[in-house]
Amino acid sequence: MKSTNSKRTAMAILAVLLVFAASGAGMAGSLAGSEGDKRFPPYLPRNPKDPCTKAYKAYVAAGGHSAYATTPYARIMSSYIVCGGHLNAPSQKTAEELAMKSCQSTRGHYKVTTGGSCEIAASK
Protein backbone atom coordinates (compact mmCIF):
# COMPACT_ATOMS: atom_id res chain seq x y z
CA MET A 1 0.00 0.00 0.00
CA LYS A 2 2.72 2.42 0.91
CA SER A 3 4.53 2.02 -2.41
CA THR A 4 1.32 2.82 -4.34
CA ASN A 5 0.70 6.00 -2.35
CA SER A 6 4.30 7.14 -2.62
CA LYS A 7 4.25 6.53 -6.40
CA ARG A 8 1.05 8.57 -6.74
CA THR A 9 2.50 11.37 -4.64
CA ALA A 10 5.70 11.39 -6.68
CA MET A 11 3.74 11.42 -9.94
CA ALA A 12 1.56 14.30 -8.70
CA ILE A 13 4.61 16.33 -7.70
CA LEU A 14 6.26 15.62 -11.05
CA ALA A 15 3.11 16.66 -12.92
CA VAL A 16 2.94 19.97 -11.02
CA LEU A 17 6.62 20.65 -11.75
CA LEU A 18 6.09 19.97 -15.44
CA VAL A 19 3.15 22.37 -15.58
CA PHE A 20 5.20 25.14 -13.98
CA ALA A 21 8.20 24.46 -16.23
CA ALA A 22 6.04 24.56 -19.37
CA SER A 23 4.36 27.83 -18.39
CA GLY A 24 7.75 29.42 -17.61
CA ALA A 25 9.12 28.44 -21.01
CA GLY A 26 6.08 29.92 -22.73
CA MET A 27 6.47 33.20 -20.87
CA ALA A 28 10.10 33.56 -21.98
CA GLY A 29 8.83 33.74 -25.55
CA SER A 30 10.50 34.85 -28.70
CA LEU A 31 11.61 38.30 -29.77
CA ALA A 32 10.08 37.77 -33.22
CA GLY A 33 7.85 40.64 -34.30
CA SER A 34 9.29 43.01 -31.70
CA GLU A 35 10.97 46.26 -32.72
CA GLY A 36 13.02 46.17 -29.52
CA ASP A 37 14.73 49.29 -28.19
CA LYS A 38 14.43 52.01 -30.84
CA ARG A 39 17.03 54.73 -30.43
CA PHE A 40 15.73 56.70 -33.38
CA PRO A 41 13.21 55.89 -36.09
CA PRO A 42 15.13 54.51 -39.06
CA TYR A 43 14.37 55.96 -42.46
CA LEU A 44 13.06 53.19 -44.71
CA PRO A 45 12.60 53.80 -48.43
CA ARG A 46 9.13 52.99 -49.70
CA ASN A 47 10.53 50.44 -52.12
CA PRO A 48 10.05 46.98 -50.52
CA LYS A 49 12.98 45.64 -52.57
CA ASP A 50 15.42 48.18 -51.09
CA PRO A 51 18.19 46.40 -49.14
CA CYS A 52 17.71 48.55 -46.03
CA THR A 53 13.95 47.93 -46.00
CA LYS A 54 14.58 44.19 -46.33
CA ALA A 55 17.22 44.29 -43.58
CA TYR A 56 14.91 46.11 -41.15
CA LYS A 57 12.01 43.73 -41.83
CA ALA A 58 14.34 40.77 -41.25
CA TYR A 59 15.48 42.40 -37.98
CA VAL A 60 11.88 42.74 -36.76
CA ALA A 61 11.06 39.15 -37.78
CA ALA A 62 14.15 37.67 -36.07
CA GLY A 63 13.41 35.61 -32.97
CA GLY A 64 16.74 36.14 -31.19
CA HIS A 65 18.94 39.03 -30.14
CA SER A 66 19.37 41.23 -33.20
CA ALA A 67 20.33 44.78 -34.13
CA TYR A 68 19.87 47.21 -37.04
CA ALA A 69 22.38 49.99 -37.71
CA THR A 70 22.05 52.79 -40.25
CA THR A 71 23.34 56.20 -41.16
CA PRO A 72 20.97 58.94 -40.03
CA TYR A 73 18.83 60.45 -42.75
CA ALA A 74 18.54 64.21 -43.12
CA ARG A 75 16.39 65.18 -46.09
CA ILE A 76 18.49 68.25 -46.85
CA MET A 77 21.92 66.62 -46.52
CA SER A 78 21.49 62.92 -47.34
CA SER A 79 20.60 61.56 -50.72
CA TYR A 80 21.09 57.97 -49.57
CA ILE A 81 21.33 55.79 -46.49
CA VAL A 82 23.65 52.92 -45.63
CA CYS A 83 22.59 50.17 -43.26
CA GLY A 84 23.68 46.91 -41.72
CA GLY A 85 22.27 44.37 -39.36
CA HIS A 86 22.90 41.18 -37.48
CA LEU A 87 20.29 38.57 -36.58
CA ASN A 88 20.04 36.01 -33.79
CA ALA A 89 23.26 36.72 -31.93
CA PRO A 90 24.05 35.22 -28.51
CA SER A 91 23.44 38.59 -26.79
CA GLN A 92 22.10 42.05 -27.53
CA LYS A 93 25.56 43.60 -27.11
CA THR A 94 27.10 41.16 -29.61
CA ALA A 95 24.28 41.85 -32.08
CA GLU A 96 24.90 45.61 -31.80
CA GLU A 97 28.66 45.23 -32.34
CA LEU A 98 28.19 43.02 -35.40
CA ALA A 99 25.49 45.29 -36.86
CA MET A 100 27.84 48.28 -36.52
CA LYS A 101 30.63 46.33 -38.26
CA SER A 102 28.21 45.40 -41.05
CA CYS A 103 27.10 49.01 -41.54
CA GLN A 104 30.66 50.35 -41.44
CA SER A 105 31.91 47.77 -43.93
CA THR A 106 29.03 48.64 -46.29
CA ARG A 107 29.88 52.31 -45.90
CA GLY A 108 33.55 51.55 -46.64
CA HIS A 109 32.67 49.35 -49.62
CA TYR A 110 30.81 52.18 -51.31
CA LYS A 111 33.43 54.74 -50.17
CA VAL A 112 30.78 57.01 -48.71
CA THR A 113 32.07 60.08 -46.90
CA THR A 114 28.91 62.11 -46.30
CA GLY A 115 25.59 61.31 -44.70
CA GLY A 116 26.90 60.68 -41.20
CA SER A 117 28.38 57.69 -39.49
CA CYS A 118 26.63 54.44 -38.66
CA GLU A 119 24.52 54.32 -35.51
CA ILE A 120 22.41 51.62 -33.89
CA ALA A 121 18.79 52.48 -34.72
CA ALA A 122 17.18 49.52 -32.94
CA SER A 123 18.22 46.42 -31.04
CA LYS A 124 16.61 43.63 -29.10
Image (cartoon, rainbow, N blue to C red):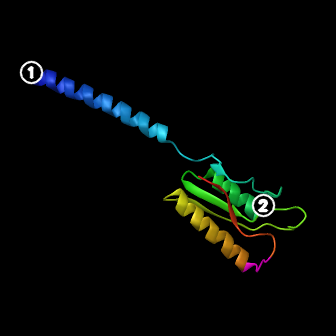
Q: Which mark is residue 85?
A: none
Alpha-carbon neighbours of circle 1 within 10 Å: few (<14), some, or many (≥20)?
Answer: few
- Label 1 SS: helix
Q: Is residue 10 above or below residue 104?
A: above
Q: Residue 5 versus residue 42: which sits nearer the camera?
A: 42
Mark 1: which amino acid? Lys
Q: What residue does disc 2 label?
A: 49
Image location (x, y in percent) of residue 116? 77, 69
Q: In the figure, 37 relative to 110: above or below?
A: above
Residue at x 70%, y 74% (from the top left corner): 106
Which percent across, then down, holds residue 100? 63, 67
Q: Assess whether mark 2 and mark 1 are in contact (beta carbons under 8 angstroms).
A: no
Residue 4 locus on image (x, y percent): 13, 22
Q: Secondary structure at mark 2?
A: loop
Residue for badge 1: 2
Looking at the magenta stretch, what is its main secondary structure? loop
| Three-letter code, disc 2 | Lys
